[in-house]
């Protein structure tokens, strides 16, 4: 039987900065326009965190029933380890989706009803990442989903529910979304780089499997560089104070050294935490700078 600590580990708390960061960045853009609505920002945070937990449990369930997680070098998986039944993990995923849905409905009711369609698209993207008969995460498209939904959609959506317009700072939100999305992708790339051997055997053809070990490491570094460029872009579009996010490099650069240094297997696990912290620091520094500017 899985204990509470097992369920917490199954929710993959080290990935949660990827859910918090876009809300902070999007709220920073809204604050720059003097349009921040803090209760809406908190609801957006609930949506983002719940979706992240939901996709983590859904991934655990779908990979577990396929046998992808039978041999792992990474963090605990509930189904693959046999600690929890597939049905129980699936229910946990649906419960998290439900929490995200309720918070999202409140935001839609107080902003614009077409946001319901966006929310539904987010849920479908989260489930079919590894779910269904032809999951797109097994086709090398996982990074596209992360960039779009945990980058662009999350940041621009957070800004929009507060400002209720795609106004003067719209492009700043898009560029911030690209920076956040690049670091969120880097987390997934590091995870998939670690899992290349086991994913190849199980038939999970991630982008890392397609690119191969050497090019995947280069791709990780490119994403970090893209995120730095996006931060500069936000500063150009808004205020130089946005460059307060640059200390994210204190975590991103050590992660790059590990990846480019050839670490493999368990040696890549610290990269996940470092990149998550880098993404969070990018958002916090940029958000504070935007609010101050």
Image (cartoon, helix red, strand yellow):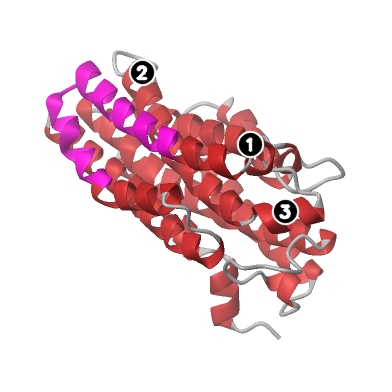
Q: Mark 1 points at which residue?
A: 211
Magenta stretch: give its range: 221-249
Q: Quadrant of the N terminus?
A: bottom right
Q: Tell me which corner region of the image, top left, top right, bottom left or bottom right, holds residue 198.
A: bottom right
Whether the magenta-drawn stretch holds residue 245 is answered as yes
Rendering coords of residue 200 (x, y %): 75, 51
Q: Which of marks 1 and 2 is in front?
A: 1
Quadrant for residue 63, please give it.
bottom right
Label 2 sits on residue? 170
Nearer the observer: mark 3 or 1; the answer is 1
Counting residues from the N terminus, which is met first, the one under dot 3 or under dot 1? Answer: 3
Q: What element carries label 2?
A: helix
Q: Is residue 28 left or right of residue 226?
A: left
SS class, disc 3: helix
Of the residues under marks 1 and 2, which one precedes in the sequence?
2
Instruction: Assign the magenta stretch its main secondary structure.
Output: helix
Residue at 59% across, 45% down: 213
On screen, residue 197 versus residue 4, left or right, reads right
Label 1, label 2: how far apart the Cα atoms are: 34 Å
User: In the image shown, does 164 or 125 lie closer to the viewer?
Assistant: 125
Residue 25 drawn at (x, y percent): 32, 37
Mark in front: 2 vs 3: 3
Q: Does the magenta stretch include residue 149?
A: no
Residue at (38%, 37%) from the top-left corner?
224
Q: In this view, does 90 lie above or below 167?
A: below
In the rendered structure, the answer to whether residue 164 lies left or right of residue 98 reads: left
Query: 10 Å neighbourhood of mark 2: few (<14), some, or many (≥20)?
Result: some
Question: Does residue 280 show up?
Answer: no
Of 7 and 193, nearer the camera is 193
Classed neighbour count for the residue bearing mark 1: other residues with Cα under 10 Å, few (<14), some (14–19), many (≥20): some
User: Which residue position is annotated with label 3?
Assistant: 199
């Amino acid at each position: 039987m899985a204990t509470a600590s097992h369920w917490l580990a199954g929710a993959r708390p080290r990935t949660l900065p990827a859910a918090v960061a876009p809300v902070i960045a999007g709220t920073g853009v809204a604050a720059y326009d003097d349009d921040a609505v803090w209760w809406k920002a908190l609801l957006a945070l609930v949506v983002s965190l719940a979706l992240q937990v939901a996709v983590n449990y859904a991934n655990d369930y779908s990979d577990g029933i396929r046998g992808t997680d039978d041999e792992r070098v990474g963090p605990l998986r509930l189904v693959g380890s046999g600690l929890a039944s597939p049905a129980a993990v699936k229910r946990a995923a649906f419960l998290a989706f439900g929490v995200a849905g309720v918070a999202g409905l409140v935001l839609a009711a107080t902003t614009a009803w077409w946001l319901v369609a966006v929310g539904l698209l987010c849920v479908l993207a989260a489930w079919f990442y590894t779910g269904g008969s032809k999951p797109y995460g097994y086709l090398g498209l996982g990074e596209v989903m992360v960039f779009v939904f945990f980058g662009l959609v999350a940041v621009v959506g957070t800004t929009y529910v507060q400002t209720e317009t795609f106004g003067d700072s719209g492009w700043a939100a898009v560029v911030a979304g690209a920076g956040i999305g690049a670091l969120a992708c880097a987390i997934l790339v590091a995870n998939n780089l670690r899992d290349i051997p086991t994913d190849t055997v199980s038939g999970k053809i991630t982008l890392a499997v397609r690119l191969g070990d050497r090019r995947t490491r280069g791709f990780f570094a490119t994403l970090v560089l893209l995120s730095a460029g996006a931060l500069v872009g936000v500063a150009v579009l808004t205020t130089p104070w946005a460059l307060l996010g640059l200390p994210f490099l204190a975590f991103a650069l050590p992660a790059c050294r590990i990846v480019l240094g050839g670490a493999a297997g368990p040696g890549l696990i610290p990269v996940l935490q470092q990149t998550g912290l880098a993404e969070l620091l990018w958002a916090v520094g940029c958000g504070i700078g935007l609010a101050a500017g």
